[in-house]
Structures are given as C-alpha cells and as structure tokens.
Amino acid sequence: MAVVFQKTRGLTDVETHYCPGCTHGIIHRLVGEVLEELGVLDEAIGVAPVGCSVLAYNYFNCDMSEAAHGRAPAVATGIKRLLPENVVFTYQGDGDLASIGTAEIVHAAHRSENITTIFVNNAIYGMTGGQMAPTTMIGQRTTTSPYGRDAATTGMPIKISEMLAQVPGATFVERVAVNTPGNVRKAKKAIKRAFELQLAGKGFGIIEVLSTCPTNWGLDPVKALRWLEDNLMVYYPLGNFRDYQEVENA
Amino acid sequence: MSKVLMKGNEAIGAAAIAAGCKYFFGYPITPQSELPEYMSAHLPRVGGVYLQAESEVAAINMVYGAAGTGKRVMTSSSSPGIALKQEGISYIAGAELPCVIVNIVRGGPGLGSIQPAQSDYNQSTRGGGDGDYRLLVYAPGSIQEMVDLVQIAFDKADYYRNPVMVLGDGMMGQMMEPVEFKDDLPKMELPEKDWATTGTKGQRKPNVINSLYLAAEELEQHNIRLQKKYDEMKQNEVRYEEYQIEDAELVIAAYGTTARIAKAAVDQLREAGIKVGLFRPITVWPYPYDVVKNLPESVKHILCVEMSMGQMIDDVRIGNEGQRPVHFVGRSGGMIPTPQLVVDKVNEILNGGK
Ligand SMILES: Cc1ncc(C[n+]2csc(CCOP(=O)(O)OP(=O)(O)O)c2C)c(N)n1
Ligand code: SF4
C-alpha cells in the first residue's frame, strides 16, 4: 500500500502536552517538515523559549537548547556565531518575544543574525494561565485584564512584524496563520523561505504565526479559530513585510 | 618565556586567548572596557568571534548558547553589569555549561562609582541568580596570578562543566605589571564534550541543553548531583596564601588588591617588632575556612580588611567559629585603604582598643 501520509522525521515520536485544538502542534509540524525537506535536521540546533512551547526541546528531532524567558535570540546568536555552518532557529511565544524579549529580538534582527525565528502569536500568556500579553486585543478579557484590555492604560496591541520590517537587518518578515489548510500551506512556504535564506547566508528571518489558545481564550477549538479570524487576522494582517529581493533593491 | 609589561584587563584577554578561548561576548562598562577592546582587536586575528551584545543580559545568554557548542567562551563586566548577568549565570550553572566570567569590581550600590571596590564579594561568591548553584571564584592578587588563574579557569570550567569567575577590581584591571605566559601551567585531563549541541550529523540522538526539570524529584536529584560537584570543588580547589602567620598575634584576612596593601602593612609592623601575619584567600569560593579555623595558637585577633563595608568578613567569621574576635577596617565607594590605615587599626586592636 502506498504511504500517503506519515509523521515527519523532524519531530520526535512522543505525544505533545499541548491542549486539544491548540495550534502550537501544527506549527511544530511545519517546522519539522521544513527541516526534513531541506535535509538539515542533522545540522539543526533549535532554541526553545519559556512559555507553553518550553518543552519544544523534547519535540524537535534535532539538538536543542532551552533559553531563559525572552533570551532565545541571544542564545541562538551565541550558537550561530560559533557554528555558522549549522542551521539555527528559535521558537518563541508572544510573551517571550514581544514582551520580556523585545531587546533580544530587535538586536538579533538589527545585526541580521543568520537565524530563523518562529514567533507564535496567540495574544495571551498561555503557560502561566492566560494573563494579558502586549499582543492581547483591545477589549479582550484575560486574567490580568478582567474588564477587557484598555488601550488608555496598557497601550495598543504591539505589531511585531510591522515593527521588525523597519529594522534594516531583517531579511525576511512574514505574518501567517494556521487556521485553514490554505493558510497552513502558505505558512509552511514562508517558514521554508526563511530557512532557505538562512542556508544562503542572507540573515535574519522571522515568521509570525497567528495561533490559538482555546484553553485561555475560553473557547472550544472551532470557536477559537473563528475568533482568530474575526479578531487577530483583522488587526494583524497576514502577508509578507520584507523579503530578500526587497532588501537588495532598497 | 620572557616577561611583558601589561595592563591587567589586557593581560586577562591575552591569557584567555592563550588558554584557547576564541569567543567573547560583552558590553562596555568601566573599569573593564580594555578587556573587550583587547578581544575585539585580537579575536578576529585568531579566527574567533568578538561580539558586543545589546546588553549584559544578552551577552551572558550568548555565552549560554556559545558554551553549549562545547567551545571555550568568556564574558566580562563590572558590578552593575554582573548584576544583570546573574540570571544567565544561574541558567549556565543549572545547564552545567563551562565558561569564564570576569568581574572587575567598581563601587556600588546602584550606579555607584567607577573606582575600584570589593563590594561585589557577595554577588560573586553567593550569586544573585536563583537556585542552589555555585561558581568557582578566583580572586588573584597580582596581574601574574590573574594571568595564570584565567588560564587555569578554562580547564576548571571544562572539568566541572561549571562557570568560573575571576574576581578583580578596578585597580587590578587598570594597573600595569610585568607578566609571563607560562608554558608549564598544570594541565588537566578533560572529559569529552559529548553533551554539546553541534548538530547530530545523523550520528547520535539529539543533545539538549536545559535547566528545566518539571518533576520535583528530578530537580532534587539534579541539585544533589550539582552539590556533589560543588563538594568536589571544596575538596580539591581551595587556594590561599599565608604570610608570616606562624608566630603571629594578629592575622589580617584580605584578598586581591587589599591583600597587597595589607602585606605592606604587615612588613611595616614586623619591622617595628609587632607580630602580624596575612591570610590571603585566592579562591573566595570555595573559601579556605579550614585555614581560619586552624590558625596557630598564638593568634589572638583576626582583622579583616576590605574595600567594602565588610562582606568577606562573614566568611572569616564562619571559618573562625567564634574562636577569636574578628575586627574590620575598610574603605568603600572606590576609596582605597592605605597601609597606614591598616597599621593604625592593628595597633589599636593590640593596644586593647577596639
Ligand atoms: C524571568 C521569567 N519571568 C516570568 C516567567 C513566567 N512565565 C513563564 S511562561 C510565561 C509567558 C509565556 O507566554 P507566551 O510567550 O505568550 O507563550 P505561550 O505560553 O502563550 O505559548 C511567563 C510570564 C518566567 N519563567 N521567567
Ligand atoms: S494553554 Fe493555550 S497555548 Fe498553551 S497549550 Fe494550551 S491552548 Fe496551547
């Protein structure tokens, strides 16, 4: 019988701890498939964040380093500078990257570190029980914005992709979502492109992936996808903000 | 090899390169900036990497990543910068990565001053990061000793898979002395770095660098294992110097720059027929407690001299176990004690004052 679907070698053969309907799992799979398809799994070194994906070091089937909260881009810098021939990536949530780790991500982009960052934006702190993140939507109720996020006291949701697209060193910046099969395919294409640019030595790439957190959004998986489409995808438009050609021509 | 005249900070850099360290991540801060400057000039020439990070927080996390690849790596800073590095130091210790961290201490607290001080004794020997971890901490008393210890530090870091700190102060960093890069420093038999994250090359299972143990029993086991390592350090790594202790009535305890000043005071007092000696810890962790505990019968007083308001004095008291009065004299904030200050204090103590 012909095999039409199988697990990627890019992921280990263990059950993940993610909640039902959480899209972290899909994103893991895309990264694993891309590493496998590019034939770089044996050269890859991933950096896991602090957040729900902290245990990513058990799931990616390659060497992994577990960083302190927000510091993954600095850890990845240390690895890549010493091992420029290896493929280095970080996998970070929005609390990790867009709050405590803003300095590290901006400067990794600024130096155009030749690494790839997978940025999972679920508009909330998942792991610690659903607190407000800088990416939380206006009006969104979280455990630390119980009356809904208020722009007057907490600012507007931070748009990381738009921000990093202004940094000269950022080679590739794209926002994707994993809410439909079509978008999953586009997400994979973007992830692959960023890794290909790394392999070609072109510098820093980041893929912002809009993701669900059914548990802390208080929605079932299907409603969570709908909420993502009606809210996150409206405020955070999908699309490419920066690609290598554009940098070249600039 | 012949002697060369070098500034302390630059000598540290040269010693690190001599020890095979080719990678440095740092952030400018007085009074240690000559060290990163030296590295930025010399590392590219030996095929290494010098990188100025966006902050000390980033620098120490770059060291975390770099040390994970199994290569020799170092960072340096001064007091407020070391305070920022404490998070990363705890992670490095927890993940059992080797690296060397240099702290060229300046006056504190806060932004403090840029003059020499020893007020980082606590943050260097006790750490400011979370958890039960320890660093091997060398406190050299001359540029030559600093050059030797920096080289030894890399071996010790690799051997124990633990960060090693070299604790200096603004004076040690800035002054010049003749130094020799010795070919005959004791070399250790070092374990293979089969834990490093270098890519599996399809040859082995993935390696993971990590300090997270979600199960309490597992973290406790990890801590017990770390403790065994620290116990081995206590057993084998204690270093100190004793000077004119045998018949002394009073022993001065001092390290680094103050030990030099104290030595001058001892010589001056001995010339006047006063029986004083000097105990100089070279490792401030592990601390030579036994030396303090087993001082000769003749010793009636201990005087701790520091460029702080009194931090090492706690370790002297631990070693002393209440046997003798422990006195203190020091200057702080970047002020440097003179030999005369020490002489006067000794006379005051021995003449019955306090
Ligand atoms: C220095 C530090 N501060 C706070 C925490 C607690 N903490 C753990 S995960 C997390 C937030 C993670 O949220 P996010 O990055 O959005 O990832 P998600 O869990 O949503 O995937 C926080 C604040 C920590 N581990 N370390
Ligand atoms: S808490 Fe949210 S982000 Fe974390 S695993 Fe569950 S659904 Fe996913």
Image: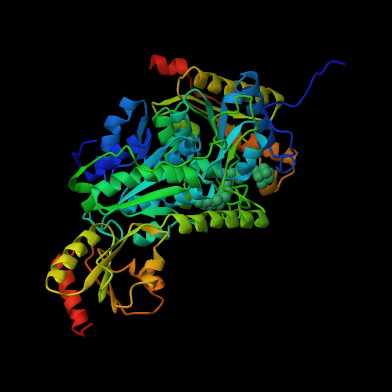
> At 48% across and 20% down in the image, what residue appears?
A243
**In the displayed structure image, the side of residue B309 where residue B351 appears, left or right:** left
- In this picture, residue B255 sits left or right of residue A53: left
**Compared with residue B122, is residue B250 higher up or lower down, i.e. above or below?**
below
Image x and y of residue B70, in percent = 49, 35
Q: A15 or A226, which is in the foreground? A: A15
Which of the image's four quarters has the N terminus of chain B? top left
- Is residue B295 at least partly visible in the picture? yes
User: What residue sits 66% from the left and 37% below the top?
Assistant: A24
Left or right? Give the position of B294 relative to B173.
right
Judged from this view, the residue extending furthest toward the bottom is B352
Q: Quadrant of ligand 2?
A: top right
Q: Quadrant of residue A122?
A: top right
B273 vs B198, nearest the viewer = B273
Where is residue B194? Give x, y as percent. Answer: 57, 35
Residue A29: quarter of image: top right
**How many numbered marks appear?**
0
Residue B55 appears in the rendering: no
Residue A225 picture location, percent across and down: 69, 36
